[in-house]
Amino acid sequence: MTRILVAEDDTDLALALRTLLTRAGYEVVPAEDGREALRLLFAERPALLILDIGLPELDGWAVLERTRDLSDLPVLLLTARGAETDRVRGLRSGADDYLPKPFGNDELLARVEALLRRSAPARWAGDSFDDGLRLVPERRSAVWQGQEARLSDIEYRLLQILVRNRGRVITTDQLLDRVWDDRDGTGRERVKFAVLRLRRKLRQAAGDEAADPLEAVRGLGYRYRAGGDPRG
């Protein structure tokens, strides 16, 4: 049974969501505040997180940020805040979809089904990927082919985004926006040199100049690929 973590502090709405999702065939794990949501996130490893921005203890923004350090599972933001700035902030921070309150039951279920359908099984920090890479968020480092590479915050965030989108090209402008919050694309050289430093650290950790899981796609951007073959 597919497990969904619902982080919602409104008792009535939390009960309604649990009833709706349970009847639709999902296993629901409820959390009433941000700290409980993070604890259950790692303990239960759900397939999907439904996250209210206005949580007590830790708000939804803090939970979302920490979630992206832990996993690439799909996140649906559920909030009363319908302003465009909040929607944009949520999507830029790593949420996969956004549904303002009030909402219809059918729309919620349709969004949940769509997110689960198009998402691969979630990967978690500390898990090893099939090509020998493991992210270590608490130390902002990566273990590559058995050796740890210590990274700067920028380098770690770059690698995290590329790994979350493995096999897909992430453009230079997208990386500027998501790592440096540079929406105008005026600092493209920063991406180039940061990726060069990141690739150098991974190769040095592996002790092999050909052991590079990142690929530069000319004129477009960069991608993380399995195997580390020496293309790009």
Image (cartoon, grey):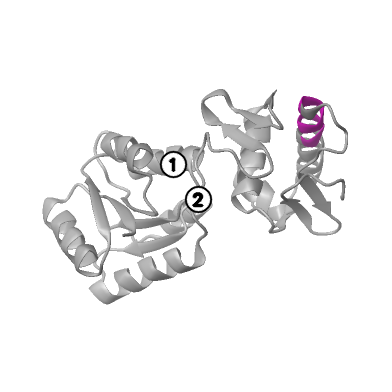
Q: Looking at the rendering, in which quadrant would you find the N terminus?
A: bottom left
Please provide percent x and percent y for residue 187. 75, 44
Residue denoted by label 1? 67
Q: Main secondary structure of the magenta part?
A: helix
Closer to the camera, 122 or 130?
Answer: 130
Task: Judge left or right: residue 20 versus residue 66.
Answer: left
Closer to the camera, 184 or 139?
Answer: 139
Residue denoted by label 2? 94
Identified by mark 2, the residue type is Gly
How many marks overall? 2
- Residue 64 visible within the image: yes
**Over which residues does the magenta segment extend?**
199-205
Secondary structure under the numbered disc 1 in the rendered image: helix
Q: Residue at x 78, y 44 (%)?
A: 228
Among the 4 quarters of the image, the one containing residue 15:
bottom left
**Are the residues tagged 1 and 2 within 8 Å (C-beta)?**
yes
